[in-house]
Image (spheres, helix red, strand yellow):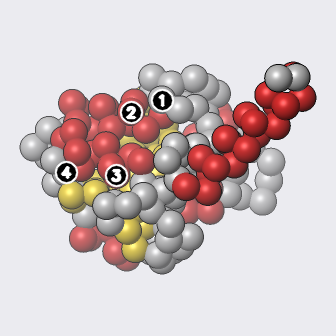
């Protein structure tokens, strides 16, 4: 078999996997879901039962939270394409819905970043931003986190920067607690 034929067979196998869904491919650092789920499961046991996985895509984080830590986690993402068995709502997250959850999680939430930060005014939140959907001005990772922290401080939200155990640079997030 020639090298060209081997390449063609490999390409067909990758396409077949994508079509049949036997192996899921996720963009970004593969360990990010595991890292955030472990943080929630080990650092917040008993304090959390209902989790909103905002802009959670296919719901890998929710799946881990449900299976490993017995948490009621659902994906809130307008794209509406969660993995089989992972509950989800195909809507944009609204900060007004935060009251229904014990914890709001945004792992690289893109356009939902501001809604999650607003929800942190009333519920504990973990926000790990990846892109600047915060302001019109150009902000790097550090400046973006500074801007969100400034909003938290202005509203009495306490927060801590946490470096999660997956490759950076988008592995630093804010773990926040609303004012009492």
| Near-viewer residue (118 or 6) | 6
Residue 172, given in percent of the width and then of the height, sits at: 52, 31
Q: Is residue 134 above or below residue 35?
A: below
Q: How far apart are marks 3 and 2 (CA)?
A: 10 Å
Q: How many labels does the image show?
A: 4
Question: Tag on residue 71?
Answer: 4
In the image, what residue occupies the spot 30% across and 31% down?
Answer: 38
Q: Distance between the residues labelled 1 and 4?
A: 20 Å
Residue 112, given in percent of the width and then of the height, sits at: 55, 62
Q: How many residues crowd around disc 4 within 10 Å: few (fewer than 14), some, or many (20 or more)?
A: many
Instruction: Give the quadrant of the N terminus.
Output: top right
Q: First in sequence: mark 2 or mark 4?
A: 2
Q: How far apart are marks 1 and 3 (CA)?
A: 14 Å
Judge from the rendering whether residue 152 lies leftward or rightward of residue 74; answer left or right: right
Question: Tag on residue 31?
Answer: 1
In the image, what residue occupies the spot 48% across and 29% down?
Answer: 31
């Amino acid at each position: 078999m020639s090298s060209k034929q081997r390449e063609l067979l490999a390409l067909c196998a990758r396409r077949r996997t994508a079509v049949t869904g036997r192996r899921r491919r996720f963009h970004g650092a593969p360990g990010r879901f595991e890292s955030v789920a472990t943080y929630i499961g080990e650092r917040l046991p008993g304090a959390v039962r209902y989790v909103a996985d905002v802009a959670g895509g296919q719901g890998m984080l929710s799946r881990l939270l449900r299976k490993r830590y017995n948490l009621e986690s659902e994906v809130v993402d307008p794209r509406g394409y969660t993995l089989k068995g992972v509950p989800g709502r195909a809507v944009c997250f609204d900060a007004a819905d935060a009251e229904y959850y014990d914890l709001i999680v945004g792992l690289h939430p893109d356009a939902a970043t501001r809604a999650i930060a607003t929800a942190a005014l009333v519920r504990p939140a973990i926000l790990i931003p990846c892109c600047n959907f915060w302001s019109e001005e150009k902000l790097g990772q550090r400046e973006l986190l500074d801007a969100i922290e400034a909003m938290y401080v202005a509203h009495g939200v306490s927060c801590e920067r946490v470096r999660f155990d997956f490759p950076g640079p988008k592995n630093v997030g804010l773990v926040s607690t609303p004012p009492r």
